[in-house]
Amino acid sequence: MVLKDKRGLNIIQIKCSKYIYYKHLVLICFSLLIFGQNQAVAQGGRYWDQNLNSEAALLSGNVVAGEGGIAAIYYNPATISQMTKNNLSLSANLFSLYMLKAENALGQNYPAERTQFNVYPRIITLTMNPKKKPDLTIELAFFTVTNEYLQFNKGFSITDDIIASNPGNEYYAGEYYLRSKFQNYYGGAGFGYKLSNSLAIGFSGMISYKDDQFYNLITADAFTMDPEQYLADSRFHIKYNEFDVRLVTKFGFHYKANRWSFGTNINLPTLKIFGNGTVVKQFEYSNIHKYDGIPLASGLFYGSRQKKVPSHFKDPLSIAAGANFYSPSGNSILLFTAEYFFGIKEYKYIEASDDPGEDGYHFAPVGAEEWLSFNAVHKPVFNAGIAFKQIVNEKLTISGGFRTDFKYTDPADEPGFMELNKRANYAINVYHLNSGFSRNFKRGAITMGMQFSYGQEKQQNQIVNLSDPVEYISSFIMPLTGQINDQVLARYFDVSLYLGFLFNFMKEQ
């Protein structure tokens, strides 16, 4: 039948009595909260998860006070002034093999895990030092800040008596699938200007393009084959494709005194230019017996789709500071960097409206704006690192570094009634350790090194419990799944190989 709630919204329910209508609302809202928080990769949940060119990567990104090379436009535009030659440069690839494992995430002794190999393109720059203004250096750059991809696909099956109203055992098949891809590209220009031999300032303005693609599907079926097939099922599905173009601005300062150099980089909050996407969300189940002694089975479908939904990939205000100490010979360098990221209050990451629009539809217990909008919150974060650089001779340099990489997201709090779409994940604090060497030649350099990254978080909530399925537990658990607990141990492990090739295409005059 078709019912209307107090706001007059249509609700599609199959074989569902008015008596249990509001219990369905609690079930759907809570389930969508739980299954909407599996976004294990989108934006990573950390700010310092990636380095830029290989030279800065070997120093673990601790280059705010200098030594960042062609990545100066990103780490501190004031240090662009240290490049005094006209060069067109290309820094090559980073190869990464990482493993993400969340023990018990899909059920008892049933982990969600993924081992994956990635190749990250790096950075191409053009630096210009005008002859008439030798204190000014201009840099044009295009580079990849983030290029992340994650895919989980797990299935589970047992034979057991799951449906009490159906005598005998049923076959059970549960399936969890997640695919997530997030890319972030920067392109723009910056300059560094020497006010004196000791002091330099800089500015960069870049366009950021972010693309977020997410697809999540959870299915659970209990059925018999002979003599006549019986089927009870439950399904959750969410998908969105979003992009956002924003303006990124940075101000930098650099000061040299004796054997010390100091740097500061101020990242202003990014400004949205344009961006939108498509979001789809559905939840349904059928032939589910909720109450003992009541033979009536119930079913339900809620679903909505909307195109041209505004998306907002906000970045906060942050202030980075660094200091480098140089030995008397200048061949040994100790580098320090720290950065504080201010928090961002809760905002709509996906901003749906009550009008489904062209090619859209809406069949849900609340308005489309509440049903499809996703919220995000960024907590304040402080990261720091240390590195060293040893110049063995004019051709060979050895480098290494360490940095923290703390999460800016937390798992969602205990949900309240009608609370939907909190953006959360298995947020993990990660620590990075780098080492390697570079060898210079006449018009460039070859860099080789490794990065080891590790982090873990205990007592995380399960995504879904497929290993202990029950037809119906309560209005807070998805039918044909088990009780959700907080026994998940999430681990992140990454070994990255830097094979950098920096080539200066312009000959020296």
Image: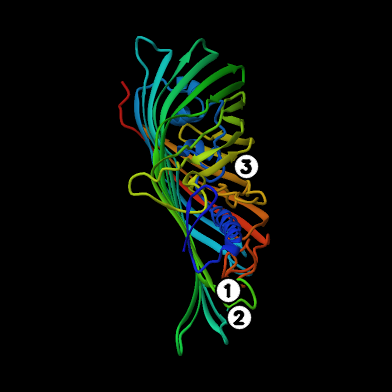
Q: Nearer the viewer, residue 367 or 198?
A: 367
- Is residue 237 visible to us here? no
Q: Which residue is mark 1?
A: 289
C-beta proximity under 8 Å, tags 1 and 2: yes
The image shows residue 450 at horizontal and vertical percentages of 52, 48
Q: Nearer the viewer, mark 1 or mark 2?
A: 1
**How many numbered badges does the structure rendering display?**
3
Q: Which residue is mark 3?
A: 406
The image shows residue 10 at horizontal and vertical percentages of 46, 54
Q: Amino acid at mark 2?
A: Ala
- Which residue is drawn at the image coordinates 60% and 67% (left, top)? 465
Q: Nearer the viewer, residue 80 or 284?
A: 284
- Which residue is drawn at the image coordinates 33% and 45% (left, top)? 358
- Which residue is drawn at the image coordinates 52% and 21% (left, top)? 252
* CA–CA distance in space, label 1 to label 3: 45 Å
* Secondary structure type for disc 1: loop
Question: Would you call the spot at circle 3 few (<14 residues within 10 Å), some (14-19), or many (20 or more)?
Answer: many
Q: Nearer the viewer, mark 3 or mark 2?
A: 2
Image quadrant where one finds the C terminus = top left
The image shows residue 11 at horizontal and vertical percentages of 48, 57
The image shows residue 365 at horizontal and vertical percentages of 52, 53
* CA–CA distance in space, label 1 to label 2: 8 Å
Give the colour scheme of this rendering.
Answer: rainbow
Q: Amino acid at mark 3?
A: Phe
Question: Would you call the spot at circle 1 few (<14 residues within 10 Å), some (14-19), or many (20 or more)?
Answer: many
